[in-house]
Amino acid sequence: MKIIHKVVSFNFYFLFFLIFISCEKLSSSEIEGKQTIEEFIPLQYGGLVKWGKENSSIPRTVKNGEIKSANNDFDWTAGFFPGSLWYIFEMTQDEVWAKEARYFQSLHKEMKHFRGSHDLGFVFNNSYGHGYRLTGDEKFLDVLIEAGDVLIERFNPIVGAIQSWDVDRGWQSQRGWTFPVIIDNMMNLELLFRLSEWTGDEKYKKVAIAHANTTMKHFFRNDFSSFHVVDFDTNTGEPLGYQTAQGYSDESSWARGQAWGLYGFVSVYEFTGEEVYLDLAENIAEYYLNHSHLPSDMIPHWDMSLTPTAEVPKDASAAAIVASALIQLDKHSPNGYLKKAKQIISNLCSERYLAEIGENHHFLIKHSTGSIPHNEEIDVPLNYADYYFLEALHRLKEIENNQNNN
């Protein structure tokens, strides 16, 4: 196989030392028997970079045997691929990856003006946010501020939340919703918290806290499982209904929704220090980790309420999100979540979930599920599964570095 030298350098040996040590996937002899470590990323993400540049497109997933891009007017997954490249740059300190990250995030720059969705936090915090954090480039901050200002336009002070979807177009218009808010929306709050830190303007943080409080009050059942969608009355601020758009039923526990809630409230605690958010994150984690339907490998099926069978698709993306969140939760909780996070990561690194060189259309993680109800992205690679997997590895390495420095 040919190594794509123009896309990568041999600093990848360092990165893959981290990945394989963290994953504990292979012994050194087994690695040598398969392929050198330094060839892995050039042929995996190097291949995705090559495809993306040839097609001026951001890789999202695979459909009908071909890579599908995130290049529509607004795609909530657009920021994950450049975000993965920023993580690889941070791990390797190889400027080639920073250059590629800059290129791919530029492809979705104009999404900062999009007023039809809540997903601006997903798109920009996970791309330009990392770029600004790592480089201090003020042009990146300008983009983030514009995106953040558009995002908070969707905040309704009576409801105390950011509206997730518009209800006058698309499939959402058929659901009869007034002001739908989804648990996924918790993932947009990190952008707002960071903007208040970076600009000194508290308006972003105030919106984020209000949204978190509304979500905490209305989204969680007694067992700390989460509804996917809560629709609100804009006159009273009270819920009109509790539904799902991607789970098995309104009362079920859509796996990635549980992951979004966990990750989101860990993040809110880290920015506020308020114990109430930590308590909720711990309870969400306990619900997930102790669920009777969680498989022994800790990679959930797409909805945790379903009896696990071979016919029910897995969602490795949910596991990657949970693993990353648990690493952060462990820093603040006496309950000890790091061991569970490492177990999930180790399982994601098994041959079942981590691609061999050249397969999986150059994505890293296999067996993720986008949306069963929409019959989209079932048992495929997803760019956000890769992103949270790399983030989890990066967070583990930070822990190792801190331990070595103490």
Image (spheres, rainbow, N blue to C red):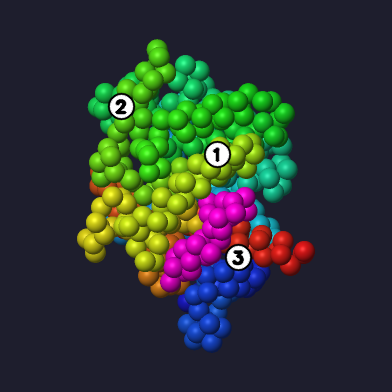
Quadrant of the rendered image containing residue 390 = bottom right
Identify the residue position indicated by label 3 in the image: 8
Mark 2 touches mark 3? (CB < 8 Å): no
Examine the rendering and report whether any part of residue 63 can be seen.
Answer: no
Q: Could you tell me residue 267's position as x and y percent? A: 57, 43
Q: Which residue does the image show at 30% across and 33% down from the upper left? A: 243
Foreground disc of the pair 2, 3: 2
Mark nearer the N terminus (3 vs 1):
3
Residue range of the region highlighted in magenta in the rendering: 324-350
Distance in Å between CA atoms under marks 1 and 2? 24 Å
Examine the rendering and report whether any part of residue 38 can be seen.
Answer: yes
Identify the residue position indicated by label 2 in the image: 241
In this picture, is 221 found above or below 11? above
The amino acid type, in three-letter code, at marker 1 is Tyr
The amino acid type, in three-letter code, at marker 3 is Val
Disc assigned to residue 277: 1
Mark nearer the N terminus (2 vs 3):
3
Task: For label 3, count other residues whose C-alpha is less than 10 Å away and answer few (under 14), some (14-19) or many (20+).
Answer: many
In this picture, is 337 found above or below 191? below
Q: Is residue 69 left or right of residue 334?
A: left
Q: Is residue 10 left or right of residue 281?
A: right
